[in-house]
Amino acid sequence: MKTEKDGRPVWTKKDLLGLEYLSREEIALILYTAESFKEVTTRQIKKVPALRGKTVINLFYEPSTRTRTSFELAAKRLSADVINVAIEASSVRKGETLIDTGRNIEALKIDIIVVRHNTSGAPNILSRAVKSSVVNAGDGWHEHPTQALLDMFTLKSKLGRIEGLNVSIIGDIAHSRVARSNIWGLTKMGANVTVCAPKMLIPDKIEDMGVKVTTDIDEALEKADAINVLRMQFERDGALAFPSKLEYFKQYGVTAERLKKCKKDIVVMHPGPINRGVEMSSEVADGANSVILEQVTNGIAVRMAALYLVSNARGKEI
Amino acid sequence: MKTEKDGRPVWTKKDLLGLEYLSREEIALILYTAESFKEVTTRQIKKVPALRGKTVINLFYEPSTRTRTSFELAAKRLSADVINVAIEASSVRKGETLIDTGRNIEALKIDIIVVRHNTSGAPNILSRAVKSSVVNAGDGWHEHPTQALLDMFTLKSKLGRIEGLNVSIIGDIAHSRVARSNIWGLTKMGANVTVCAPKMLIPDKIEDMGVKVTTDIDEALEKADAINVLRMQFERDGALAFPSKLEYFKQYGVTAERLKKCKKDIVVMHPGPINRGVEMSSEVADGANSVILEQVTNGIAVRMAALYLVSNARGKEI
Amino acid sequence: MKTEKDGRPVWTKKDLLGLEYLSREEIALILYTAESFKEVTTRQIKKVPALRGKTVINLFYEPSTRTRTSFELAAKRLSADVINVAIEASSVRKGETLIDTGRNIEALKIDIIVVRHNTSGAPNILSRAVKSSVVNAGDGWHEHPTQALLDMFTLKSKLGRIEGLNVSIIGDIAHSRVARSNIWGLTKMGANVTVCAPKMLIPDKIEDMGVKVTTDIDEALEKADAINVLRMQFERDGALAFPSKLEYFKQYGVTAERLKKCKKDIVVMHPGPINRGVEMSSEVADGANSVILEQVTNGIAVRMAALYLVSNARGKEI
């Protein structure tokens, strides 16, 4: 990684496509940069001129109020101008290709494209087609890097470090970009990651990513410093991902009962929105160990950092 | 009501949920504050920095271009950042609860939630769940406080006072949040309110709100200083609210003919959009007594006042 | 045309409804003004305070991500506040009339209405109803003046002039507002315009607009300094505008083969989005003669000029 003369690391990538592509130092730089932006969101006037005169487009091929809103706020608090474009899946078929769309956006002199797409790898394709920066806001089952970064930021805020922590990711690992980005990020930062799910929801060869695998929730909870509980989607392409919500909750739901056997200050995370009574009980979601709303707050700071860094990447020209 | 040392009243409520919950002094303070903002909208540069660095979310569970646009303009003219979120009724069922949505918005450090919801009381629920300010932009058949405030502001601009005026509200009283908010506001400000509608569109015990009731339009018009004509919706849950548009116009439509028998300078209001030839004739809608477009203009000033006051409520912390 | 004391022309129209209504001098003034705004979009901080405190509404009765985004960016780079309103065709029928909508927008003290409408002449109707400026962003098959202006701006940038150029417009002339605006603009600026299409797609009496007509693509290409290739829509009101895409490409598609017989530096334009392999081959779309992405870039500058000029029209009051 490039550094300043005084040794400070320098961000050089024009894009943020996934944590798979970042070094430990780059992840640390994003988290470090987010610290200073977090302070901004506590001010009376929650705004800095860092990206004044820059333009950010939220290009969403999947509907997402939460992530879009978080990016929009992050960009506006950096004083950027924001354009929202929601493209329905149905209109893509008749429309122009992703590359043509990207080149048009580049021609509009838009600085940063925040893209969510149902196809894994779409942000990578876009990135190669344009000089504008591309920030992945979730692609297929591939990555959701800013979600994992805000999870790690929250973890570090609560426990002081990431290295050496035991983190269990619980839920539908097979279909989760949040899980994949967390695994890449956490293992790079030196955490011990366990994934826990019913067998049908654990992808083949997931161990190759450097994680432990278990189907036993009690084992996943036992030594955990933190858990990241994923949202369950029961209907997927018309088929059932798991027989019943009640059965899932019984077998895998995080309850106060189960938390009692955990470390006392275990950190409970969830990317939201929560299915109360499915992935976890309301008691846990709203309990003392839950940092779910802090994650939402930290999302703004992390996204401000991501937008700021890619926009100021050394050596980049737009 | 709290006052400054010099006797000026101080706004202390974090929310604007309905005129039912406001004192006469609080209503007067909003109208007074709106006066100064009205001047801003006549300038070449229609913008003041009052809410710079603050964030307003328009959280609309019912589609509404007019009210959303008015609030968006009001917020932007105060230099706030605005996020628009439209939530389709269909997606609510699968989605998170209103309280979870509210807590997420609060976690995003959004200062003011402008909410429209098809369920009466939804803004009240939201208000109790979050520290952010909540402004009701219309909830079910309950209240639409900023509409009633702009109606009163317009009335005061045209006739110099509200106290002692005879105001008739004509139309579907039973299903109108505009009617309810106007009744609360006008009676508190000392106006004499008459409601007029076909019997099936007058709710039970409406007299308990301090209004006179009549089914006879000529009686409603006779002594009126002002009328507020409501929009008729003929289809409601598949059933007809009234047999026919033509018949409604014949019995209750405000026509030039009927106006002739009224006070010469009677003020004609309508919250819009008008069904021309149903609630009133085009001649009346566009005539010398109509203040319908002034209401639209005043809506911005009143909403600027509402956003400004709740955001600066004394003793509030976000 | 009015001029300053020093002879510089002065813009006096409150609207930009179509190139049919502009003089040669007025078109030249827009293109000249766009030159200086083009420079702004190359800066690090792509923003000027020219329209600070002004409000622009994008009132779109037809969906259009590209044109809306371009206008939104243009307005924001002039520091105006922008409100987006998309109105579905289905909701127009129950809703208020265009004139009532316009009067409401005017009452909101919105300075400029950018309107796209499926009905030819809708912007003209709106313009007469309101004091706000109206900019036509495409109406029915009538005009799309900013598209033609950006085409001419691009032409002038590449070839140094418009007067005397041979420009061929190729494609569905009959249903194209882009074609009509280009014909008005180019002929006023002194270009020689040829239109080329299958017979069924050439409107009656198009010669009266001062253009040559041919059904032979090779004739249209032969002496052309520039071509403007229109997007083909094959389904229109359920009927086919042309038997087959393949057949159209064979007869009218612009290919590298066909370009070889043209002037070496022929300028190839397309309003986008391109149907690759229908109107032109990918080789041509992405080739050395294509200025398609420059058109997109220039669209911002031209729209900034249009918004700026109508907003500052001499003698206009809002």
Image (cartoon, coloured by chain):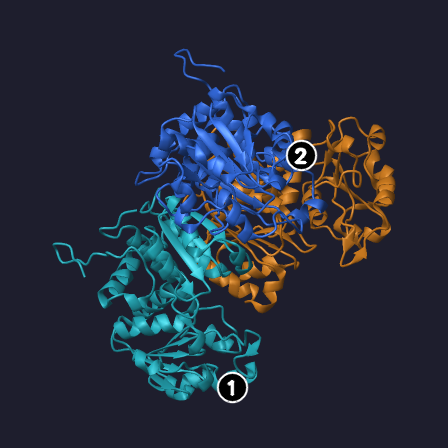
Chain colours: A cyan, B orange, C blue
Q: Residues within 10 Å of mark 1 (few under 14, many from 20)?
A: some
Left-right relation of B199 to A265: right
C189 relative to A61, above or below: above
Quarter of the figure with residue A310: bottom left
The percent coordinates of residue C233 (x first, y second) are 57, 48
The residue that disc 1 covers is A250
Taking depth in this image into account, of A128 and B236 the one nearest to the observer is A128
Q: Give amino acid for label 2.
A: Ile
Mark whose residue sits in front, 2 or 1:
2
Left-right relation of A1 to A50: left
The residue that disc 2 covers is C99
The percent coordinates of residue B131 (x first, y second) are 48, 58
Quarter of the figure with residue C226: top left
B107 relative to C12, above or below: below
Q: Give amino acid for label 1.
A: Lys
Q: Residues within 10 Å of mark 2 (few under 14, many from 20)?
A: some
Left-right relation of C6 to B228: left
Residue B289 bears which disc, if any? none
Kindly give the residue lying farthest to the top in the view shown: C5
Taking depth in this image into account, of B137 and B284 the one nearest to the observer is B284
- The residue at 61%/39% (across/down) is C199
The percent coordinates of residue C201 (x first, y second) are 61, 40
The percent coordinates of residue C284 (x first, y second) are 40, 46
- The residue at 34%/52% (across/down) is A130
Q: Quadrant of the N terminus of chain A?
A: bottom left
Q: For numbered disc 1, what is the local secondary structure?
A: helix
Q: Does the image show residue A85? A: yes
Q: For numbered disc 2, what is the local secondary structure?
A: helix
Kindly give the residue lying farthest to the left in the view shown: A5
